[in-house]
Amino acid sequence: MGKVAFLFPGQGSQIVGMGKNYARRFGNDFESIFEEAGDALGFDIRQLCYAGPERDLMKTEFAQPAIVTVSSGILRVLVREGLCPDIVAGHSVGQFSALVAAGVLSFADAVKLVRKRGEFMAAVQTPGTMAAVVVSQPEQMSQVTALVKEMDLDIAGKNTPSQIVVSGANHVVPMLLEQLQAIQGIKTKPLAVSHAFHSRLMFEMEEPLMAYAEGLSFYDAQIPVVLNKSAKVTTAVADVMEDIRAQCTQPVAWSQTIEAIGQYEVQHVIEVGAGNTLTGMMRSFGSHWKGQSTNSPMELEKVLQLMRKFKEGA
């Protein structure tokens, strides 16, 4: 079948009802994952995922463990069926799902950590916001990044060669968007977030997050992980810990992550989670990529069928 990469989505992929259809089709895996998550967190995350309310599921301290739980349930289905990744990566909080897949963190510790991560993010006192910027011509990106720097904002994510996410002060980000909207070929979209994630404005969450992480058990990865900040491919736990800290204030180097996966000679990229944002982004990196989503039980079954087809032909 060739080398396989598992990609795990981040915040924004959460929706009310997430996990419910998977539980109907793949009962045991999802019953066990929701029970373990509930025991670790001390509340019924299954009820929150299945029925909301949406206002709670959208809160970062609930959204993050919900995302990791559903992604980890899908991961269990794939691994049980014999499809194991050769390399993993996750976008922002998706990185913690990737760490579970790589054996760096137990699932229980991962959901505890991202719950705390969300709480520390929500508690940051400095107000801020974020926006996505898409350019139609590659040369326009340097113009955008120069303007971001000039206005003392931060780039929170380098998602594709044509898309970045900008993060910064509430009163400055709209000013940037106003200037960019006047340029033909540039599109902008304000994001519905509570803070300026992945920017210097989140600095105050670094120390409490790392202090909490010190009480959990981390191990060297059993399979390579691509780090968020540097897109470095590693199995060293020291690199992972440094990346967890860096995630607070540094951009997600997703474009470079996909380049790193390409250098690892991956033939199949599977987005493991309730969403298809990362699969959609893959189109920006060339038609040679074979990306598959597990956005629904039907899509997950298609991935499993493809795997069985390759096994039978082997």
Image (cartoon, rainbow, N blue to C red):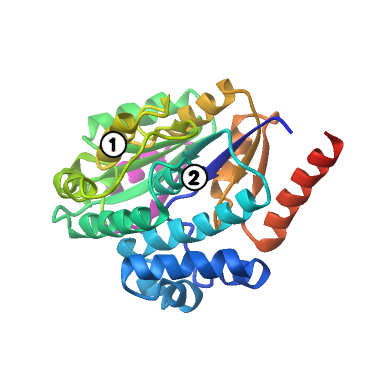
Q: Quadrant of residue 48?
A: bottom left
Residue type of the residue flagged with mark 2? Ala
In the rendering, at what x and y percent does residue 178 appear?
34, 45
- Residue 22 is a magenta residue: no
Residue 314 visible to the viewer: yes
In terms of secondary structure, where does tag 2 sit? helix
Closer to the N terminus: mark 2 or mark 1?
Answer: 2
Image position of 5 with respect to 42: above or below: above
Horizontally, residue 80 falls left or right of residue 12, namely right
Residue drawn at (66%, 44%) of the image:
83
In the rendering, at what x and y percent does residue 301 appear?
72, 56
Horizontally, residue 179 falls left or right of residue 278, namely left
Image position of 116 with respect to 58: above or below: above
Horizontally, residue 39 falls left or right of residue 29, namely left
Residue nearest the observer in this picture, 113 or 174: 113
- Quarter of the image containing the C terminus? top right
Residue 186 visible to the viewer: no
- The label shown at residue 241 is 1
In terms of secondary structure, where does tag 1 sit? helix
Residue drawn at (56%, 20%) of the image:
263
In the rendering, at what x and y percent does residue 205 appear?
18, 48
Q: Which residues are magenta?
A: 174-194
- The label shown at residue 101 is 2
